Image (cartoon, grey):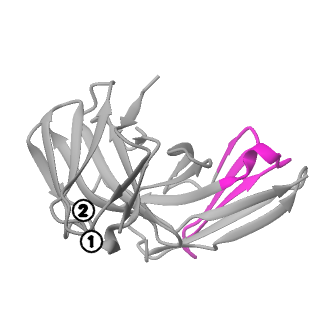
Amino acid sequence: GEDVEQSLFLSVREGDSSVINCTYTDSSSTYLYWYKQEPGAGLQLLTYIFSNMDMKQDQRLTVLLNKKDKHLSLRIADTQTGDSAIYFCARTPRGAGNMLTFGGGTRLMVKP
Amino acid sequence: DVKVTQSSRYLVKRTGEKVFLECVQDMDHENMFWYRQDPGLGLRLIYFSYDVKMKEKGDIPEGYSVSREKKERFSLILESASTNQTSMYLCASRRELGFTDTQYFGPGTRLTVL
């Protein structure tokens, strides 16, 4: 995922907020997604945002999209140990509805 | 609940062997995908299929082929395995509707080529 970039690692304490960041280069993206991968498991869709939105909130999750800076973030409020996983940012390029381009993944470690 | 299953969780093969990775989904999805996952590189698309007997190359198809003879089954084939194909392989499926339809992933097959 060279055109979708994420930092490799984030460590937070239980109860704190986590913010996972993602930058992308292709401004033609239509949808942007956050996936979660728990150890030994496949990827699970957490949330998504359409490119004409700035923010989406879903319970403890808040997605912020800054189109000018091509920056996407996922904020997890009240982070729990069960949130420890790898989080992938992904995008769907315009005109490529079946395709997803993934970032390298951010490993979130939640300390008790 | 959508279920995507992969034939093996762990596989060890020797260089030059022919390797088959099988993926089955039970939700009548039109689209199926094979990715490989490597640390720091995220998921990279190898091939995808949008219908039976139909396939399209992804970002890294070299060294791989695929087969989709039945709608529910999508196979990834390594004709002659090499050590640089040691990786985690993930299969996914998705139905043919709008962008918000998610890809459902299998648990992955960790392949080691010696």
Residue kind at label 2, given as amino acid type: Gly
Task: Please identify the quarter of the rendering in which residue B4 is found.
Answer: top left
Residue kind at label 1, given as amino acid type: Ser
Q: Quadrant of the C terminus of chain B?
A: bottom left
The chain carrying label 1 is B
The chain carrying label 2 is B
Please tell me whether mark 2 sits on a helix, a strand or a loop.
loop
Given residues A87 and A111, the one toward you in this image is A111
Given residues A51 and A91, the one toward you in this image is A91
- Residue A78 is left or right of residue A65, and the answer is right
The span from disc 2 to disc 1 (Cα, nearest Å) is: 19 Å
Q: Residue A85: in sight, yes or no?
A: yes
Q: Residue A29: in sight, yes or no?
A: no
The residue under label 2 is B58
Please tell me whether mark 1 sits on a helix, a strand or a loop.
loop
The residue under label 1 is B82
Magenta residues span A56-85
Q: Residue at x 25, y 69 (%)?
A: B15
List x then y, in percent, for residue B100: 43, 41
Residue neighbourhood size for the residue with mark 2, other residues' Cα within 10 Å, grouped as few (<14), some (14–19), many (≥20): some
Q: Nearer the viewer, mark 2 or mark 1?
A: 1
List x then y, in percent, for residue A4: 48, 71
Given residues B7 and B72, the one toward you in this image is B7
